[in-house]
């Protein structure tokens, strides 16, 4: 369990309503993925607002080619580990592939992530009717939901790869419609991944819930990166929308603190991190 230093100021817990208040005040929301208690404690100490236990663990922790093989049991395990390292940072856990394929599965899977995994919110991908049905069913039962639109990694085969979404006028209109749909269904937060900056900015202005961008430009209400990308330790080429914050610094805590400061100041993403 994370133990705060005796002389450190006590952080006020980040809550779901607090995120919407941050959007209203124009305060940037800082999020990072996290998969274990040790890194979680560093996120906590740096004042990161959201720790996202992403199914990206399938690729960066397990070495798999996609997020699809990640199981609900694995998500519960990693979520519970991260929860032990947090006291104020809000914990969001991904619903893995096919674990929310209908309302009964969405309810059962989310119950495990909250009750066993210690999450405060679950995240699911997509904005079609069936996804909105799951969001609505969870929301009416007081389970906070983060929606995820744009490049949705669980749909990698249908999308034909990890490609930017919403580039054409029709595709942009479709994503705007989906953003309104997930909001109306009861989503409390929206991740926008790999969409043009102008489209992300438009969606951010059109909906009342906060948007968190990853490869979606600087106009979202907050930013999230895969922790290993942000530390420059992911094998292979780092995504253009990311940045190695560990380079030139002497520690992981310093890198996380620098990332949080740059997001809050509006310095990240910089021009070189914005997708074309």
Image (cartoon, rainbow, N blue to C red):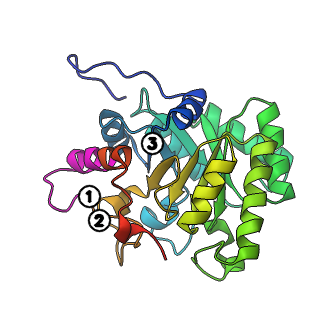
Q: Which one is in front, 76 or 227?
A: 227
Between marks 3 and 2, how big is the CA–CA gap? Answer: 23 Å
Q: Position of residue 175 (x, y in %)?
A: 72, 63
Q: How far, Cα to Cα, is label 1 from label 3?
A: 18 Å
Label 2 Cα crowd, 10 Å radius (few <14 / some 14-19 / many 20+) = some
Of 224 and 59, nearer the camera is 224
Numbered circle sitting on residue 232:
2
Looking at the rendered structure, which numbered label has been put on residue 245? Answer: 1
Mark 3 crowd level (few <14, some 14–19, many ≥20, 10 Å Cα)? many
Which of disc 1 and disc 2 is earlier in sequence? Answer: 2
- Residue 185: x percent and y percent? 81, 43
The reply, left or right, for residue 42 in relation to residue 114 is: left
Q: Answer yes or no: is residue 74 visible.
A: yes
Q: Does the magenta stretch include residue 144?
A: no
Q: Nearer the viewer, residue 271 or 57?
A: 271
Q: Does residue 200 lie above or below 82 as drawn?
A: below
Q: Earlier in the sequence, mark 1 or mark 3?
A: 3
| Residues at discs 2 and 1 in contact (Cβ within 8 Å) | yes
Q: Is residue 111 left or right of residue 91?
A: right
Tell me which numbered mark, 3 or 2, is placed earlier along the sequence: 3
State left or right for residue 191 relative to residue 217. right
Query: What's the residue at 34%, 29% (across, down)?
Result: 2
Residue found 59% across the figure and 43% down from its top: 210
- Element on which disc 2 rests: loop
Write down the residue under mark 3: 28
Query: Is residue 95 at least partly visible in the picture?
Result: no
* Residue 122: % across, % down: 64, 43
- Alpha carbon of mark 2 to alpha carbon of mark 1: how far? 7 Å
165 vs 16: above or below? below
The spot of residue 1 in percent (x, y) is: 37, 28
């Amino acid at each position: 369990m994370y133990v705060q230093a005796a002389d450190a100021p006590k952080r006020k817990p980040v809550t779901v309503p607090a995120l919407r208040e941050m959007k209203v005040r124009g305060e940037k929301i800082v999020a990072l993925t996290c998969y274990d208690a040790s890194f979680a404690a560093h996120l906590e100490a740096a004042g990161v607002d959201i720790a996202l236990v992403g199914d990206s663990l399938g690729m960066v922790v397990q070495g798999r080619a996609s997020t699809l093989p990640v199981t609900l049991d694995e998500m519960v395990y990693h979520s519970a580990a991260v929860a032990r390292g947090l006291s104020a940072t809000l914990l969001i856990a991904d619903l893995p592939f096919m674990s929310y394929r209908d309302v009964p599965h969405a309810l059962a899977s989310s119950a495990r992530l909250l009750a066993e995994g210690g999450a405060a919110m679950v995240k699911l991908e997509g904005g079609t009717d069936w996804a909105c049905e799951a969001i609505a069913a969870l929301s009416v039962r007081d389970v906070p939901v983060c929606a995820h639109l744009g490049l949705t990694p669980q749909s990698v085969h249908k999308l034909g790869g990890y490609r930017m979404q919403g580039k054409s006028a029709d595709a942009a209109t479709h994503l705007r419609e989906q953003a309104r749909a997930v909001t109306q269904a009861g989503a409390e937060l929206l991740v926008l991944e790999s969409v043009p900056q102008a489209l992300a900015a438009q969606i951010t202005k059109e909906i009342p819930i906060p948007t968190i961008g990853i490869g979606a430009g600087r106009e979202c209400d907050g930013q999230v990166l895969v922790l290993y990308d942000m530390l420059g330790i992911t094998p292979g080429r780092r995504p253009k929308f990311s940045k190695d914050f560990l380079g030139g610094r002497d520690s992981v805590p310093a890198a996380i603190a620098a990332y949080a400061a740059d997001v809050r100041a509006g310095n990240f993403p910089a021009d070189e991190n914005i997708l074309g």
